Amino acid sequence: MLDNKEDLEYTKKYFTFYSALNESERMSFESNLVKVSYEKGVNLHNPEGECLGVLLVRSGSLRVYILSEDGREITLYRLGPDSVCVLSASCILNYITFDVHIEAEIDTEVFLLNSAVFGRISRQNLTAENFALKNAVEKFSDVMWAIEQLLFMSFDKRLAVFLFDEITKNNTDTLHYTQEQIAKYVGSAREVVSRMLKIFQSDGILEQTRGNIKILDKSKLKKLTM
């Protein structure tokens, strides 16, 4: 239960179904909402674990991914501050039929709504059910984009899209990612990423140092994304 009024007001802003709850549902919501911190690298949700609940990211970043049969990680999407995730409560959502892993990319703080409570509320309240369905549909759009990239986009373009999106989103020319991390993001092997980064480097697009990639020619990188 949250003991900070500011935190409660924040969660009400993003759990938009709150205003449609009756008094009993609001009491249940408020008494089963907690703030949780996860350290970088922690896997907070996986198919073998307990049903986590609905997440609202307050700060930090989460990566949602699946594992291929050979153990390769395929990133579906990432969640930053103010993002809601209902796939972490997939056990009580009948229309979600696959499980995901969720990892803290950096130290992350989230608000967590108990899965059983949310399940009960969404069954009783149409607005809450629509909230869950809308969020799931939005995330499946991200999933389809990730799958489309894997199936139909050449790897050099896929890598270029990732790098260009990252420098644009973070407003920087330098990315602090290892080749192993990039491989997880783009759904490939580290060796493949390493070879393509070397090609980009020989073309004057970027330069690499340990754990860092500096983009030298944004226009040339952008052309590879088209």
Image (tube, grey):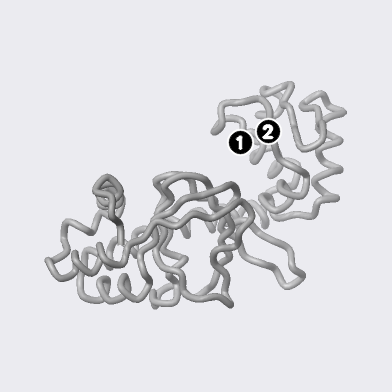
Labels 2, 1: front one: 2
Q: Is residue 75 visible?
A: yes
> Which residue has dot 1 on it?
166
Mark 1 crowdedness (10 Å alpha carbons): few <14, some 14-19, many ≥20: some
Q: Quadrant of residue 73?
A: bottom right
Could you tell me residue 81's position as x and y percent?
Answer: 44, 44
Q: Residues within 10 Å of mark 2 (few under 14, many from 20)?
A: some
Q: At 44% from the left edge and 72% from the top edge, which residue is drawn?
A: 90
Question: For numbered disc 1, what is the local secondary structure?
Answer: helix
Q: Looking at the picture, does residue 33 appear above or below residue 145?
A: below
Q: Quadrant of the N terminus?
A: bottom left
Q: Are dots 2 and 1 in contact, CB under 8 Å? A: yes
Residue 35 x, y percent position in the rendering? 39, 56
In-image side of 181 versus 78 (left or right): right
Q: Residue 106, image x and y in percent?
A: 59, 47
Query: Where 14 sits versus 221, above or below?
Result: below
SS for dot 2:
strand
Residue 209 at what x, y percent from top left?
Answer: 82, 31
Ranked by sequence position, the earlier of labels 2 and 1 is 1
Which residue is at 19% across, 64% downward?
26
Write the residue at 61% across / 59% down.
42
Structural distance between the alpha carbons of marks 2 and 1: 8 Å
Q: Amino acid at mark 2?
A: Leu
Q: Which mark is residue 175?
A: 2
Position of residue 150 relative to residue 169, above or below, is below
**Horizontal relation, residue 40 to residue 156: left or right:** left
**Does residue 136 appear in this view?**
no
Question: In the image, 205: left or right of 82?
Answer: right
Quarter where residue 225 is shown: top right
Amino acid bearing label 1 = Glu
